[in-house]
Image (tube, rainbow, N blue to C red):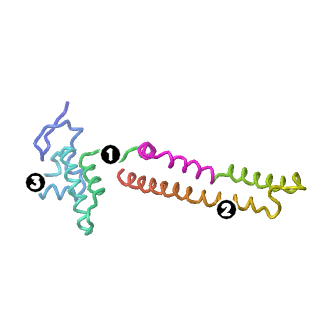
Amino acid sequence: MNTATCFISKKKFPVAELYKGRFLKKEILDLIRKDFPDFTDNEYISIESLNEYRKKYMAKLLKQENIEISEMEQQVIESIAKNELLSKDLEEELSKDLTHGQRVADRIASFGGSWTFIGFFFLFLLLWMAINIFVLVKKPFDPYPFILLNLILSCLAAIQAPVIMMSQNRKEEKDRKRSQNDYKR
């Protein structure tokens, strides 16, 4: 196996795990030469050492922009240095923390906002009115102007609106976590 020595760490590595100075980004090369003035374009640097300089370069860029490095940005910088992924499968993590009430609210919201619900509800309204107008002509339980139906519709709206809002707030939180997770990729 063909090996070479990392100029920075003085350790031997397979050539496949090393970079030559001439292939590095100029800004990173300048940072290396600041610490090691003898580093030339033909010298090798290991991935491990290179990632340390990439980390320094990212921190320098953020500081130049007078940006305070947030905890999440610090995690991203460290993950670059370690050459690892920070992102994770959020769907499983977010769904395991849901309470029974939250799951029910999500189901109600997804059904309440579907064409199936609209179809069933329209059919229910037509049946209610038809039964009270045509079937129970002599003694309807809810004569025109359908005051009982109005009460039922108002109660349904009063219950359904907060349930849908709870579900939307939770989905908003999921979206926020997903965008943070995408940033970490």
**Left or right of 134 in this view: 173:** left
Q: Amino acid at mark 3?
A: Phe
Question: Which quadrant, please, contains the N terminus?
Answer: top left
Give the mark, 3 or 2, whose residue is nearer the N terminus: 3
Dot 2: element: helix
According to the picture, the residue beneath numbered tag 2 turns out to be 154
According to the picture, the residue beneath numbered tag 1 turns out to be 85
Q: Amino acid at mark 2?
A: Ser
Q: Position of residue 130 (x, y in %)?
A: 84, 54
Dot in front, 2 or 1: 2
Which of 185 and 48 lies nearest the eye of the viewer?
A: 185
Please say whether residue 99 is one of the residues in the magenta stretch: yes
Q: Amino acid at mark 1?
A: Leu
Magenta-colored segment: predominant secondary structure: helix
C-alpha distance separating marks 2 and 1: 50 Å
Q: Are the residues at dot 1 and dot 3 in contact (C-beta closer than 8 Å)?
A: no
Give the mark, 2 or 1, whose residue is nearer the N terminus: 1
**Left or right of 68 in this view: 136:** right
Q: What residue is at 13 percent from the left and 37 percent from the top?
A: 12
Q: Position of residue 145 (x, y in %)?
A: 80, 64
Q: Position of residue 2 (x, y in %)?
A: 19, 33
Dot in front, 3 or 2: 2
Please say whether residue 46 is one of the residues in the magenta stretch: no
Q: Are the residues at dot 2 and dot 1 in contact (C-beta closer than 8 Å)?
A: no
- The label shown at residue 36 is 3
Query: Which portion, as a residue range, is magenta?
Result: 91-112
Mark 3: few/some/many CA within 10 Å (<14, 14-19, 20+): few
Which of 58 and 102 lies nearest the eye of the viewer?
A: 102
- Where residue 6 sits, quadrant-wise, is top left
Dot 3: element: loop
C-alpha distance separating marks 3 and 2: 75 Å
